[in-house]
Image: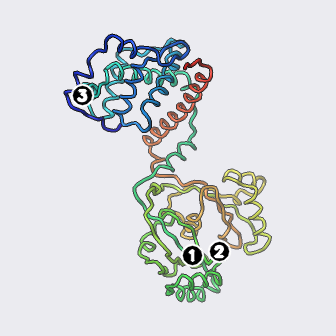
Amino acid sequence: MRALNFVGAAALAVALAAPSGAMAQGLFAPAVTVNGSAVTNYELDQRAKLLAAFNTPGDPAVLAREQLVEERLKLQALDRAGMQLTEEGLATAMEEFAQRANLSLDAFLASLASQGIARETLRDFVKVNASWRDYIRRRYGQTVEVSEAEIDAGLAQQSGPDGVELLLNEIIIAAPPPRAAAAMARAEAISKLRSTAAFEAQAREVSALPTRAQGGRLDWAALSNYPAGLHGLLLSLEPGEVTPPIPIRNGVALFQLRDIREAPQAPTEIAQVDYAQFAIPGAGTAQALAEAARIDAVTDTCDDLYGVARGLPEERLVRRSVAPAALPRDLGLELARLDRNEASWNLSSDGTLLFTMLCARTPAAALDEDARSAMRNEIVSRKLTARADILLAELRAQARIAP
């Protein structure tokens, strides 16, 4: 909650002065009725002052009417359900509300009083909303389900401290044993380039990856996507510089830095990488590439690969969940390019094309039971809020509101 507006203590007497005569009649006259229940001008004035004290964005008078109409609908639903907050529960709720402003309840009420806001105004506001919260939990709480996948997704979306994203060019030169020496020599020459155009020309000529068509250009990617063993090397580059040749299985990799930036919502530390690989015989053949493209067209998730592998030898499909540091370098680099449930077929082994799909990156927080419990509660709260909004909209649609 934002800080309250404090005014001079001299206003206190004026704020607490009771209205009288015609003024009192005007203040307590109905301003709007909700199913026959009146909202008075005094309530509207008090709520507008309360919203102003909270620095609530928008027109306080308009918001006051909107809130009070909704609260009448809530109170009527609570009455029908026979629910009422106890005095002890209300006292606790008011204390908790004051604590959001880092104030004791007495100090909080004093600051409101200095702005002409009565204790009863806060009391009514807290009472109806705390009661409504409890009612929604009692009505819908047992029907709200949260899956482990939802928790994983929520934790994956949480931002950590500022991180680093890299804009790279890549080349991987195929280097089977008979051509390993020649491939390394070519890679050594490319590593000395400082021109982006020259590197991209080499990528179009020698790279074994599909990105060769665009000169090896990659999109922005978080540093954490790449194997941990390469982080220091990649961070040491200046724009235009190329890494030394990086040996991988049956190949050699090179990266050129185009740009680097801080990411305000960097991914959290990754604890595990879940991936699947489906083996396709005939690496390098048109038939194998066509089969990989077919599998890509009929699969949306890693689980779909089980259907592809049905009836085939078990070793054709491998699915693992490992720490990033445990990934072979070539596989780690390949997975770094992929988003969840995205696939590639750039890797091969012993004459077999490897259809590789990233299933998930599991943040370290996802393995922490306290973090998982907190995320579960957050998701439950969001779902309950959504159901409460639907119920309130239904109540409003059925209500008689005048004027």
What residue is drawn where x is 29% and y is 25%? 116
Scheme of image coloration: rainbow
Within 10 Å of disc 3 (Cα), the crowding (few <14, some 14-19, many 20+) is few
In the rendered image, which quarter is residue 236 located in?
bottom left
Q: Amino acid at mark 1?
A: Glu
Residue at the limit of the structure toward the left, as seen here = 10
Q: Which mark is on residue 330?
A: none
Mark 3 or 1, which is nearer the eye?
A: 3
Q: Which mark is on residue 107?
A: 3
Direction from residue 115 to residue 274 in the image, left or right? right
Circle 1 is placed at which residue position? 170
What residue is drawn where x is 48% and y is 72%? 259
Which mark sits nearer the N-terminus, 3 or 2? 3
| Mark pair 3, 1: CA separation | 62 Å
Q: Which mark is on residue 209?
A: 2
Mark 1 residue element: strand
Q: Amino acid at mark 2?
A: Leu
| Mark pair 3, 2: CA separation | 67 Å
Do the numbered discs 1 and 2 sit on residues whose CB atoms are within 8 Å?
yes
Within 10 Å of disc 2 (Cα), the crowding (few <14, some 14-19, many 20+) is some
What residue is drawn where x is 43% and y is 78%? 238
Q: Position of residue 127 (x, y in %)?
A: 40, 20
Within 10 Å of disc 1 (Cα), the crowding (few <14, some 14-19, many 20+) is many
Q: Which quadrant is home to the N terminus?
A: top left
Task: Give the answer, above or below, for where 172 lies relative to 43.
Answer: below
Which mark sits nearer the N-terminus, 1 or 2? 1
Task: Give the answer, above or below, for where 11 lies relative to 272.
Answer: above
Most foreground residue, 294 or 195 = 195
Direction from residue 325 to residue 122 in the image, left or right? left
Q: Position of residue 156 (x, y in %)?
A: 51, 50
Q: Which quadrant is home to the C terminus?
A: top right
Q: Position of residue 154 (x, y in %)?
A: 52, 45
